[in-house]
Amino acid sequence: MSQHVCPWWKGYFLASPIRKLSTNPKKILSPYIKPGMKILEVGPGMGFFTIPMAQMLNNKGKIYAVDLQDKMLSALNKNIRKKQLNKIVETRLCNSDSLNIQDLKDQIDLAVLFYVVHEAKDQLHFFQQIKDAMKPGGQIFIIEPKGHVPEKNFEEMIKILTEPPFAFGIDARPIVHKSYSVVVRV
């Protein structure tokens, strides 16, 4: 799915606890996560958002963490085991053409796409796979980094989501430090 994939070793910088000073996962996600939800996270890296989401599910629900890089998933699995969250988080390796989520059709309450959409080589195909996994009324929360992704590209991505064939509605445009963000309803 990638045009340019973030190298796995950068995952250590992205997972740094210092990052929480400017980007607090629980503060950003708490309005959207409820115990019992099924969550799809594409591009979880080493778990900066995954671990707090799993803790917010309070042992009730499931996170499907899908990544293109086996080294990212290995580090994420280590972090999941360390925090004893392996019953809540299931990791999956995807490839450049498939997110490997066909079995999740109509099951996902919330899809979390943080710093990953710009890496998709075909955004229409990428979003179609996610849409197929979503429950009616589910939400897709997208954050893309300013400075790395031009605002024009982010707005084009929103246009893909809000016009046919998807025609999703915008629920919110949360403010996230140094990022563009949107929450759409399926």
Image (cartoon, rainbow, N blue to C red):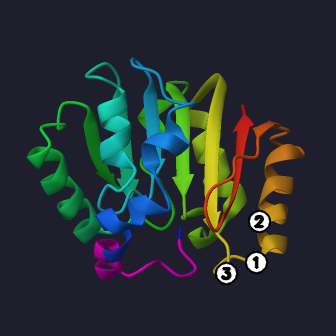
Q: Determine the CA span between mark 1 and mark 3.
A: 7 Å
Which of 39/100 is in front? 39
Residue type, label 2: Phe
Residue displayed at 35% across by 26% down: 57
Mark with earlier residue (2, 3): 3
Q: Is residue 15 visible?
A: no
Is residue 148 depicted above or below 175 in this figure? below
The x, y position of residue 116, in whole percent, is 54, 64
Q: Nearer the viewer, mark 1 or mark 3?
A: 3
Tags 2 and 3 touching, CB below 8 Å: no
Is residue 85 depicted above or below 18 in this figure? above
Tell me the element at label 3.
loop
Q: Determine the CA span between mark 2 and mark 3.
A: 11 Å
Residue 154: mark in rendering: 2
Residue 150: mark in rendering: 1
Residue type, label 3: Gly
Tell me the element at label 2.
helix
Q: Which residues are magenta?
A: 2-12
Q: Quadrant of residue 141?
A: top right
* Magenta stretch contains residue 131: no
Which of 141/101 is in front? 141
Q: Quadrant of residue 37?
A: top left
Q: Determine the CA span between mark 2 and mark 1.
A: 7 Å
Badge 1, how many Cα within 10 Å: few under 14, some, many 20+? few
Outermost front residue: 21
Residue type, label 1: Pro
The x, y position of residue 56, in whole percent, is 36, 30
Residue displayed at 39% across by 17% down: 36
Q: Is residue 162 visible?
A: yes
Residue displayed at 47% across by 78% down: 5
Q: Nearer the viewer, mark 2 or mark 3?
A: 3
Badge 3, how many Cα within 10 Å: few under 14, some, many 20+? few
